[in-house]
Image (cartoon, coloured by chain):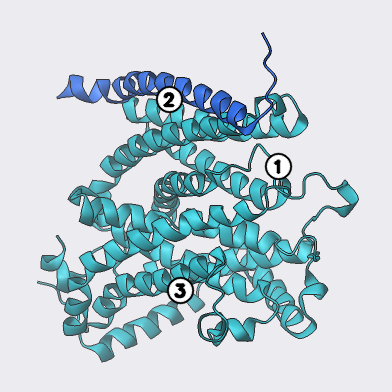
Amino acid sequence: MDNTIHTLQDFMLHTESNTYILMGVYLVCMVGFWKFLTQKDEEQD
Amino acid sequence: MSEQKNSPAQGMTDAALGFMRDDNQKFSPLTIVTGIILLVGTILTILRFTQGLGAVTNLTDTHPWGMWIGFDLMCGVALAAGGYTTSAACYLFGMKKYHSAVRPAILTAFLGYAMVVVSLLYDVGRPDRLILAYPFVVQQGTTSLLFEVGLCVLLYLTVLFLECTPIPLEWLGFRKARNIAVKLTLTLTILGVVLSTLHQSSLGALFLIAPSKLHPLWYSPYLAVFFFVSSIAAGLSMVIFEGALSHKALHHRMGKAYLEEHQPLIFGYAKAASLVLFGYFMVKVVGITAGDNWHLLPTPYGVWFLVELLGFVALPCFLFAVGSRNKDVGLIKFTAVLTVIGIVLNRLNISIIAFNWHLPLAERYIPSWMEIALSVYMVTCLILVFRFIVTRMPVFDEHPDFKEHHE
């Protein structure tokens, strides 16, 4: 498969696709991080 | 009831006596070091304003922005963000439990911005024009982000001054003027948040004009977002750090309310800083992805970038979370210092270390000892003014005559 970037369209598609995947991972991580951060407070309440 | 006299004349007499009391204190090693810094700084100041920039700096046409912009201005503005974050938390988001931290945070912010303006007077070639508001009256240059930054800093310094006025007014016993100033609090807080959002981000956006000069790992279309988000973490960490320092030196000056609210404040701020740093880490990663700069990470600059990102963003994020979970005050204070160092490192990376990165070392900017000495001089002056104010005026404690007014 040819991964060469020839045009701005190719570049944007490549970087934006990676960004979207990252944002998905980030949102999942955020839930876990929030749980980690507030778990003890919730237990105390 | 308080026995304290509250007339303006009595207030001024107390102030004068307080000042004289300090003059009679013994000379400690710290006092001698401070004296040497002030002496050297004063001599260098005279040299700077009589002989010009070339006499004390290594600035050139290739590197017109040096230590005073990278450290005094960029770091000063970021670290003074505790003012708007704390007042917004208390007055806009209704977190009244942080009320006792507002005055120290606002005062630090005001002095920080004052230092920024003073350092600009040292840095610009024609400081007289800055004093005469020449850039706002004669030649605005409204297409430049610098105009927006300059205007915001000017307005925000005024806002911070007005937000600070209840402190000296209570001290001097000017009840009516103090009540008017207090009524302006909400308006000033909103103005402060708006102005801070604008210029904190614009400081980052200033570098958008130099994509070929700034290393690609630090250059990003999201620079404005990076600067704004990191300033919130810097402000929160600075309030924790400054509180820890003040506790050591000024514990006897702290009122009951401040001491009672201090620990909950530390835990709340640590949690907030952890969340903000988590978001900051992610937008930085998005920045690398958007520029497709992953291949630059295994280079010397890439390793340095990872030191900043992992050591001073990801690590503090995790440590703040652990400290907040386990209610570990020591860990939170250590992490606050780590975050402050990280923000300073980030601003220095962008304005000095990764700027003009492609030039050979011989052509790179390295600050002269006199530039560094003058930066130390300005920070020392700031600490001295802060100490002078908090040891005399109601900053960490409530003025006995105005206790009923503190909400």
- Is residue B20 in sight in this rendering? yes
Q: Chain of mark 2?
A: A
Element class at badge 1: loop
The residue furthest bottom is B9
The residue at which mark 3 appears reads as B154
The front one of A20 and B273 is A20
Disc sitting over residue A23 in the figure: 2
Question: For chain B, what colour was chosen?
Answer: cyan
Q: Nearer the viewer, mark 2 or mark 3?
A: 2
| Amino acid identity at mark 2 | Met
The residue at which mark 1 appears reads as B215
Residue at point 65%, 48% (across, down): B350
* Position in image of residue A17 (x %, y %): 50, 22
Label 2 close to label 3 by CB (< 8 Å): no
Q: CA distance from mark 3 to mark 1?
A: 31 Å
| Amino acid identity at mark 3 | Leu
* Position in image of residue B39 (x %, y %): 69, 75
Point out the image quarter for the N terminus of chain B: bottom left
